[in-house]
Image (cartoon, rainbow, N blue to C red):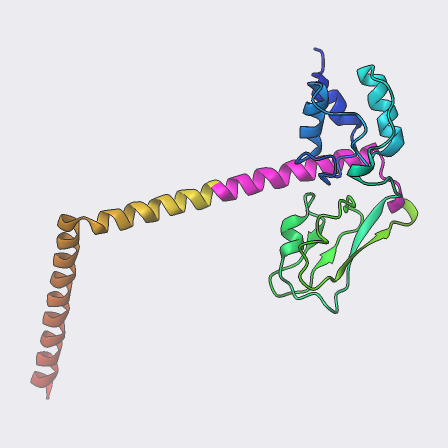
Amino acid sequence: MNTPPALRIDALLPQTQCTRCGFRDCASYAEALASGKSDINRCPPGGDATIHRLADLLAREYRPLDPECGVERPHHVALIDEAYCIGCTLCIQACPVDAIIGAPKQMHTVLTELCSGCDLCVAPCPVDCIAMLPATGELAIWDAGRARAARQRFEARRARLAADRIDRESRHSKEATLLSDCAQPDKRSAIQAAIERARVRRASAEEAAHSRRRERR
């Protein structure tokens, strides 16, 4: 079975999900390339090497990296200054590959071995406590294996967020239905009548209890 062009292109991309190419994720950029709707030189994380690979795969002429998308640089990772972190969780929400952990109002930490260097966590931070620093040692090498792992985390995160959204919408729909039902006059009357019956039963039970206590005295 032949692999669809978009998937072959996507396999060449670094999967940082940084959006610098102008698309919402690497897969969207790959689809645009496959359909001829974008240029091959819009991926700063992939840099010159990725442009050459895309040119070979798509039989297009090599073009240098588009400066409007950014500049090529060594792999960077995010670092949170934990002394200033206020635990707002905005960086966690922004991270496309689940590389930041923490809880609301608690200190957050970057799992540098998972960080794709996308920079997306920097701008949302309200206290400017996140910096992008050059990765060192083995972390400086963002190879195909790490790219695949990042893509898997990205897909898992997207599926989780979609499930959460469906769950919220379902709950809101049920709440709206309940409010709508309660707003109907006949149902309001039925609910009020049920409340009144319960009040009468409770009053009767309390009176019976008082009577028994008086008799025991």
Residue 10, image x and y in percent? 74, 26
Residue 214, image x and y in percent? 9, 85
Pick whichever, 18 or 7, lies toward us.
Answer: 18
Pick whichever, 121 or 69, lies toward us.
Answer: 69
Q: Quadrant of the C terminus?
A: bottom left
- Based on the picture, tell me whether residue 150 belongs to the magenta stretch: yes
Left or right of residue 195, residue 145 in this image? right
Residue 40, image x and y in percent? 79, 25
Left or right of residue 106, residue 148 in this image? right
Residue 37 figure quarter = top right
Residue stretch in magenta: 139-165
- Above or below, comparing residue 2 to residue 63 in the picture: above
Q: Quadrant of the N terminus?
A: top right
Pick whichever, 38 or 197, lies toward us.
Answer: 38
Query: Which SS type dominates the magenta stretch?
Result: helix
**Which residue shows up at 70% across the image and 21% down it?**
6
Left or right of residue 64, residue 88 in this image? left
**Which residue shows up at 77% across the image and 47% down it?**
115
- Above or below, comparing residue 26 to residue 184 in the picture: above
- Above or below, comparing residue 198 to residue 118 in the picture: below
- Above or below, comparing residue 206 to residue 160 in the picture: below
**Which residue shows up at 51% across the image and 40% down it?**
163
